[in-house]
Each structure stands twice: as structure tokens, then as C-alpha cells.
Image (tube, helix red, strand yellow):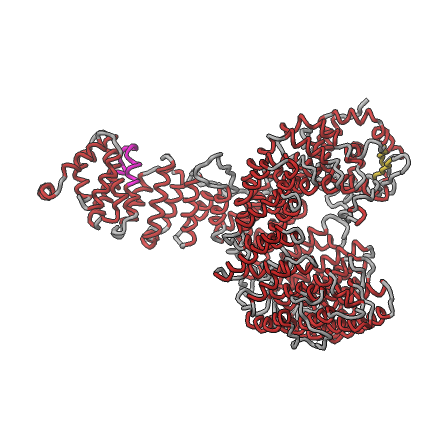
Amino acid sequence: MAAAAAAVEAAAPTGALWGLVHDFVMGQQDSPADQVAADVKSGSYTVLQVVEALGSSLENPEPRTRARGIQLLSQVLLQCHSLLLEKEVVHLILFYENRLKDHHLVIPSVLQGLRALSLCVALPPGLAVSVLKAIFQEVHVQSLPQVDRHTVYSIITNFMRTREEELKGLGADFTFGFIQVMDGEKDPRNLLVAFLIVHDLISRDYSLGPFVEELFEVTSCYFPIDFTPPPNDPHGIQREDLILSLRAVLASTPRFAEFLLPLLIEKVDSEILSAKLDSLQTLNACCAVYGQKELKDFLPSLWTSIRREVFQTASERVEAEGLAALHSLTACLSCSVLRADAEDLLDSFLSNILQDCRHHLCEPDMKLVWPSAKLLQAAAGASPRAYDHITSNVLLLLLEQFHKHSQSNQRRTILEMILGFLKLQQKWSYEDKDQRPLSGFKDQLCSLAFTALTDPNTQLQLMGIRILTVLGAQPDLLSSGDLELAVGHLYRLSFLEEDSQSWVAALEASGTLATLYPLAFSSHLVPKLAEELCIGESDLARGHESTKCSRHVHCLQALSAISTHPSIVKETLPLLLQHLWQMDKGNMVAGSSEVIAVCQSLQQVAEKCQQDPENCWYFHQTAIPCLLALAVQASMPENEPSVLRKVLLEDEVLAAMVSVIGTATTHLSPELAAQSVTSIVPLFLDGNISFLPENSFPSRFQPFQDGSLGQRRLIALLMAFVCSLPRNVEIPQLNQLMRELLEVSCSHICPFSSTAATKCFAGLLNKHPAGQQLDEFLQLAMDKVEAGLDSRPCRSQAFTLLLWITKALVLRYHPLSSCLTARLMGLLSDPELGPAAADGFSLLMSDCTDVLTRAGHAEVRIMFRQRFFTDNVPALVQGFHAAPRDVKPNYLKGLSHVLNRLPKPVLLPELPTLLSLLLEALSCSDCVVQLSTLSCLQPLLLEAPQVMSLHIDTLVTKFLNLSSSPSMAVRIAALQCMHALTRLPTPVLLPYKPQVIRALAKPLDDKKRLVRKEAVSARGEWFLLGSPGT
Amino acid sequence: MVGLGSEMVGGGGASVGLLENANPLIYQRSGERPVTAGEEDEEFPDSIDAREIFDLIRSINDPEHPLTLEELNVVEQVQVQVSKPENTVPVVFKPTILHCIHAHHSTLIGLSIRVKLLRSLPQHFKMDVHVTLGTVPWSMYISVGWCEPVNKQLVDKEWVAAALENTPVLEVVNQCLSSRSLAWLLTPSLHTGVLVPAPPRAHSLVFLNR
């Protein structure tokens, strides 16, 4: 050793090392440790040299000095353990193990050293076991401080990660040793690690030997976890973390079952809600690993506990967890493998449940009927076997009960329970048709559904419809006779009153069933509806009024509802289109409402076709030329225009057609869309009518030239088409089209067509790829806008153009958008356009339905509202303060629109800066401003009560003032705000309580019921403020 | 003069023990009143009608059950009226649940209805809240004059005022009137329904302490 030391001394600058060691050990400075570690890492000296330098301090008789010496060594090892050689490790381990017997002051540093060595790759076999044995033997872990206990857990974790086989060689001694280590642990940080170790012990199959119960005890004593993290806890451990890691331990092995289940049964009965929930959730988790053997002895008690909780609880969460636990229990019992001679516990368990719940099902008025049904359904939903067992028993009983009870509400409850059981069936697919438990009841169930469908009570009808849908969803259950009957009932129900729930449900059910049984619907329902339409046509022709008319509308809606299958669409779409032609032929006196109804039906059919590309193309190809032909025909100048012709060109009718065309276009594949665009754009630009059916028109179609005003209005239809195209579809003659659109957009002859052209232009602009052409279009447009704003006749059109272009650019974050927004903001103080500009902000922030939509492939950035808010609100606020008094409301209104559309979480942080402005806006006389300000403040009252408390005086006064506004909507909103005010801290509110209660007596006598309702709830809450019992 | 002994408060506020009638008959709630076009029309005045009064009281919580008066059929819409010229509101309620036999329970229900109407109706309305036995199934067990003292208290303005000065009574009334009543969540009676004997806990770690 001496020779080696001499040799080393000659080779390395050990003088520096000695100095550092001395500073650390004797000088009590901490910094040299890092320096030494760094030097070892860089190779300046070896670990051996450090040990030698420490030399005497490691053996110093003074424990503090020894501790200091070992601390330095441990810190160096922690950083340099990867450099150690196997031989060095052996020596160091021996040294450290030996030191475990040392003075208690030394132990923390020794443990640190062992932790460093436990990370060592070069640790020879056998040493891990020896270290752990030494720790188990020499150290009383639970008397150490938290940090050192944590070190022990880390040593164990490290060894378990790298030396699993060796530790397993220790057998159950390792488990026993660990039990001793963690017994009595109280710190949540350590517990998380300890639970993880126990979980690994179990899941990695370490030998537990005779210590299963001890291991359970040492962990289960924390159950249920009762831990509230201290405020400002820097460790961030939540109650939930502990609960989940303890649950992972407890539910990790069936071997704990005999100890755990009694504990869970005891804790479910606890008074504390969280203990109940935790117990039920843990039981649920256990079922994943348990089998019949583990559960056997506890099933009766478990069932009693769950039943009690579900029957008696006031908390929905307890009920839900109880049901979930029962579900898992049943599932667990269902899938356990049985020995041939063993009794099947599932059957007896389910019989038990049936026995306790069955009779409650016979009392559909009583409180326990639903808890019982839910319990049975939870069990039945667990496995096909459980389902068989329960439904074979319950369905018969419920069918019987249905006929025994005659009151509608009782019958409804029974039907709803039956429905619940039927729905569960959908979870499993049965290979064999006869195995299905429902097939035995099929006829009874069908007749039950039909009885309900024919009942005058709406609720029963609804249940009947839902049961029918569920039965239909079972493949091969219904016979063709059943289907024909069902379709007949649905046909009858689809002519009920339009606002009735059964009508809505019947249409929905028709749609669902039509996808499954297209043949039944096209052979039994479509012909009837077609006939009905014909009758309607002849009635209309004879001028019959509203009675038949509503039947006609119902018929249209039924046709669109069943168009859920391509083969049905091939029958319904021609019917609808033919119906439109019939109207056009002048056979009928059709008002706009009839045409709109047909268009709405077409639009619904189009929506249903969207998902299937082939079907979508079929619709597009069939419907769009037909609609365009009708419209073009109608727009032809004529000596005596027929009634329908005029009707087709009305704003509302065109809007309805726009939405059909849009819906039929958005889902086209780019290739097919490109095919379609080459015929539609030339129609509008060149009057090429060759692709239209029945295209013998008296004169040319030239909507962009000086054609008739009627022709010009059809630009809306062009807009619907080109603005719904996928972005990569190339539009022919784009340059010409854009120029023509711009021309029309600023003409003041027909506002409808100029707005349509403006929107079309904006829609195309939004999708156009950035580049020179886009810049050119923008330049053209801006020139047009500026020229228009300067000349009186078309100022308003120019403004509309500016607004829509701004919107198109704001949506896609175009760099020019800020410039355009600034221009728009400048117009707020324009005496003529100011109010329109203020309302324009609403358009900028809202979603359109026809153009610039995401569905129509427009480029819409997700955060555009937030971005618009951040970019423009400061300017708006500034503009407000600088503006002359008479135009200030315009700024407030613009701001209101922006705030109103903003997601509230984004708005909240901005609140302090905006609040004073909002409060000022409350005094603004404009109803729109008042309303939007109130609707802005209301959520803020709920979410940021602290900030709002500062303004309580203003808020109370203004809200009370507005509660007598002439506008009903403002009164309602103001009272809702008064209600929301009660969320502020009670001490802030109490001084105002008498005044508010007096003032709110007045709206109690409001002439409008909706206002009184809000007044009642607001006043009620104010009464409860600071009152006992709340 | 205010007959509010400790018995009343003990019975209504925090009863301990089993729920009487744990599986009571439940009646369907009538649901929100649908809004009509007339109600949305600014100009058209809609007057206070019986349904509106019923909507005020139907969601009052029973002092002991986690259920509303409507669900327990204590109040019914047909029992509520508005007499137009003099603006009186007669409201009749029935002790349909067994524990209503305790007069204090009915008094509390009556008081809650009265207070709710006082807080919610314009001042020029006069209300008349009283209990009647009607056809409740246990009327045969109750003496004929059972309703009288309760009704006497409910019409006595001074009695009502004095009752509301009494903090424990006000507490129960407020709980009945609060929209998200937690009152019954806190009473222990609900959780001690059927007692299951807790199985003995496993023994402790004896030999680990060697």
C-alpha cells in the first residue's frame, strides 16, 4: 500500500486533493466535494487516491469527523459510481457495510454511499444481498429522518431493478426485511416509493413466504387514505396519487383477498363519502385479478353492502361506483374457470340479486324501482351468461307487469326498464341465432312495442319507438312481417304534429332502421310517401289550404329522414326533384314556404349522403343541374312570369337552395369536384347551358353582363358552389370570375346580388394560395373599396366588401388583415357608417353558415378570435377614449361583439384592464351593448368573484337599473347577473342585502313570466345569503 | 305564544335513526314549463297563473327526504289556484308521507311554502297556505281536528314572523328552499340503514416486534 501510495504521489498533483479534503472535513466547507468529484470524473485522480487522502478522517475517533469524511466519499461516489472497477466496489462495500454499525451520526452518509454503490454496474454478484442483509440487520429505518428513510427505499429500488434474480435468492427473508423497513412509515413521499416496492414485490413474483398477511397489514393500515396536502406543498403529492398507488398494491394479488375483502366491506359502511368511494373502487379493481375462490365466502356480505349503498345513497357517485363494482364482481364470477365438480357461484349470486330486487320491479311508483333495475342491469351487463340468467327471469316479469299496470306513468317506467335490459344485449354478438336470449321473447316484445306505439300517451309512444329501434338493431331478430308492421307504425307517427317528441323520435328511428332494412323501407314506405306527395300536389293545384299543406311538409320530412341508405336515396331524391319540377310546371300554386320545405328536405338528404363518396357524387350530379336549371329558367325575362318563377328568386328560397348546393359540394372528392366546376363556372361566365336538363330557354343566361336582375341574383348559387369546393380544386377562368364578382359587388342596384358577389369574392380570396395573383386580387379589391367609400351611391356596398375581405383575411392570418381591420376601426367614427361598422365586428368574430366555413374548406385558423382580440382590443379601447361623445357607443358596441365571442378562459386574464370599460358600457343606452356586456359580466362574476368584489357598488346599482330596462332580454340578463352576484364573498354582499331584496320585489311583478322567473331565483338566493342553514 | 319547542327542531332538522318510509311512493316531476311564443313576445303581458305558483313551490325539498314536495305528492298543481280580482293564492298540501303525521313536520312544510311565496310573489298577493288530510291513507289514524292547530299557526302572521326569528327553524326552512340542498346529505340517518356486522379485522403483526 505504501509503495503504491508513493508511486501515485509521484505521478499526480495530490497536494491539491489533500487541501480540498482538509477543507471539507476539518474546514466544514461543502464546495470542495463537487470540485473533488469533478476532478475524479476528469481523471485527475482516482477514487483510491480520494480514499487515501481521506485516510485518517475515516477512522477518526470523533464521530462528527468520521461522518464528514464518509460524507465526502459518498458524494464523490454518487457522481462517479460509473467509473468504479469491480475490485474497488468490493472494498468499498465491505467498508460501508462495516460502517453501518457505526455511530448514528455517521449512518446518513453511509446510506448515501451505499445508494451510490447500488447504482454501480460493476457490482459483483452476491454483494446486493449482502448490503440489504446488513441494512435489515443493523439499521432501524423508521427511527431515521425522512430523507434517510428515502435513501434506504432508493437502495432497495435500485437493487430490485438490476439484481432481481439475486434478491429472489434471499427468498421470503427479503420480503420480511422490507416489511420491517416500511412498518410505521408516515411520510407521503416515502409511502409512494414504498407502495411501488410492494407492488413490484408482488407483481414480479418475489417470494412472500409466510408473510402475506404481514405485507397486507403493513400496507392496508393506510386504507382508506386520509391525507390533505398542506397548503403550498412543494412536493405536489395529491391525495389521489396515494390512493391510486395503494390501490395498485391492494388489488395486485388474489392472495390478499381473504384480508382485503372484510376490510372493504367494513369501509363501504363508513360515514365518510370518500371512504365509501375508495372501497368500492378498490373492490372494482380487485375483480380484475380475483376468481370465484377468493370471492366465495364474501359474496353475500359484498352484495348486501352494494345493495345498501345503491338503495340508500344520496350521492350519484356512490351509486355509480356501487353499480360498477357489482358489474365487475359479476364479470369476475362469469369468467372464472370452474372445476367440473365445483358449484357455480355465478348462479347463486345472481339468484340472490334477483331475489332482493325482483319484487321492487313490481312497484313502478316506488322509490326503489330504479335502484333495483339499475342493479340488475349492472349485473346483467357483465357477461352473456349473467344476461341470460337475469333477463330470462326479469323480462318475463316486466312483460307481465306491463299488462298488470294500466296507468301511463307506471307503464312508462316498466317500458324504460325493459329498454335498459334490451340495450345490454347489443354488447355481445351471438353466433348461433337460437342461442340469443331475446329470440324467445321476440313476439311478446314486438307486440309490447306496438301496443306502446298506439297508445295516446306521448311518453309511451317514445318508449315504443326506442324499443323498436333496439329490437331492430339485433341482426335477424325481426321477421319481414314484423318489419312491415313497424314501418306502418312509423309511417303513421311521421304524420303527427311537427313539434311533438314522438314525431321527432319516429323520424330518427326510421332513419336508423332504414340503414339496416333498406328493402323494407323502399318497398313499404317510399311508395306510400310518393302517393302522399301526389295527393299533396293535386291538393295544392286545387288551392287547398293549410290542412293538407302540413301533411305535405311531413311527407317531405319523412322522405329525407329515411334517406340513410344509398339504395333509398336513389328513390327519394328523384321523387323530391320531380316534385319541384311539378311545382314549376305551374301545376300547383306554390308559395315560398313549400319550395323551401322541399329544399330543406333535399339538404337533409345531402347531409346523409356526405359520408359515402359514391352516394355523394350521385346526389351532386343529380340534384345540382336540376336546381340550376329551375333557377335559370325562373330568371329568364318573360312577358308574364308565373307565380312560382317569382317565388324561386326570393331571398329565402335562394338561401335554401344555397344550403343544398353547399352541402352537396363540400364532401366531393377533388377529382369529381374538378369535373363539376368545369361545367358550372362556364354556365355563369359564358352562359354555357349545355349540361342543364330541359335547357331550352327563351334567351341567354348572362348573370354578369347586363342580363336581367333576376339572373344576377343567381350569383348566390354560384357562390354556394365555388365557396364549398375543396381548396386544391382549380377554378377555370378564375381571373375573369374575380373581376366580374368585384364589379357586381359594388353595384348598388340590387343589394342581394352585390352581397352574394362580395361573399363569393371573399370566399375565393380566403382559399387562394398566397402569391402574386392573390396580391393582385387584393389590390384590385382595395382600389374598388377606396373608390366606393368616396362616392355616395355605393358607400354601403363598398363597406360590405371591405368587411367581408377583412373577414376572409383575418381567418387565415393574412398579413394585410391588420391593415384592413384598422381601416374598419376608422369607420367607427364615421357618422354614416359608424353603427354598421360596429355591427361588422360581430360578423368578423362569428361563424358564417354559407361561406368561409371550415366545412366548406375555408382556411380558418383555430385561434383567430384570440388573435383578433389581442391585436385589436387595445386599439378599440384607445379609440373609445379618444372618440367624440356621440360615436363612443360604436366603439363600445364593437368591443362588446369581440368580447362576447371570445372563449371565457381567454377573457378572464384580460379582465382587470377591461373591467372599467365594461362597467362604463353598462351605462350605454344601446340595448345590444347592454346585453352583450351583461352576458360578458355574468360568467366573470362566477369565475372571478374576487376581482369583481372590488366593484360591488357599481355592479349592484347598474344591474338593478337595468332590471327595469324596456327590453325583456336586458331585464332577464340583468337579473341573471344579480343572481350571479351571490357567488361573491358573502361579507362583501351583506351590506347590500336589504337594498337588493327591496329592489328585487319590483321585477317579481314584471309583466313577463320569463323575467319574473329570473327575479324569483335571484331574490331567493339573496334571501339565503348569510342566513342560517345555507 | 310561539309553539316551537325543541321537539319540532329536533324532529325536522337532524333526525337520527332509520328513515321512516325508506321506499316512499315517488311521483313524476312535471318538468320545466315549455316557453311559448307569447312568453317571448315583449309586448304581450302574461299574468301569474296557477302553474307559475306551482312551479315556485314544487321544487321545495322535504325536510327529511332527499326528495321534493312534488315527488312526494305533498303538493299538486290542482291544489294551487289564483283567484284573480283579489289576488289571493290558496295553496293546499297533504301529509302524504307517513312522518307528516308529526304535526311539526307538516308545520315545517307549510312554513317553507309560505316563506317561498312571500319571497317570490309581488306584495299585493295574499297567500293562504293550509294542510288538509284529504284521502291520505293513514287519515284514519289521525284525529279529525289534527289539521286545526297547524293551520291556525300558518295563518297567524305574528306566529310566522316569530318562527322565522328562531334560528334553528329558519335553518331548516332555508335548507328546504335552497336550490341545491345539501341538508339531507349531512344527516347521518341515511347512511345507517341496514347494519351489516363488520367482520373482525385481521390481527396485528405480533412477531415483527421481536
User: Which image quadrant for residue A596?
Assistant: bottom right
Up-down: is A312 above or below A403?
above
Q: Which residues are magenta?
A: A97-112
Q: Residue at x 62, y 44 (%)?
A: A828
Left or right: residue A195 versus residue A521 is left
In percent of width and height, residue A685 lies at 62, 69
Q: Is residue A105 magenta?
A: yes
Quadrant position of the C terminus of chain A in the picture: top right
Question: Would residue A836 be seen by someone viewing this image from the given angle?
Answer: yes
In percent of width and height, residue A401 lies at 78, 58
Left or right: residue A427 versus residue A491 is left
Q: Residue at x 73, y 54 (%)?
A: A361
Q: Residue at x 79, y 53 (%)?
A: A409
Q: Is residue A46 magenta?
A: no
> Looking at this view, is A692 or B154 the one in front?
A692
In percent of width and height, residue A841 lies at 61, 48
In percent of width and height, residue A199 lies at 43, 50
> Looking at this view, is A880 or A847 the one in front?
A880
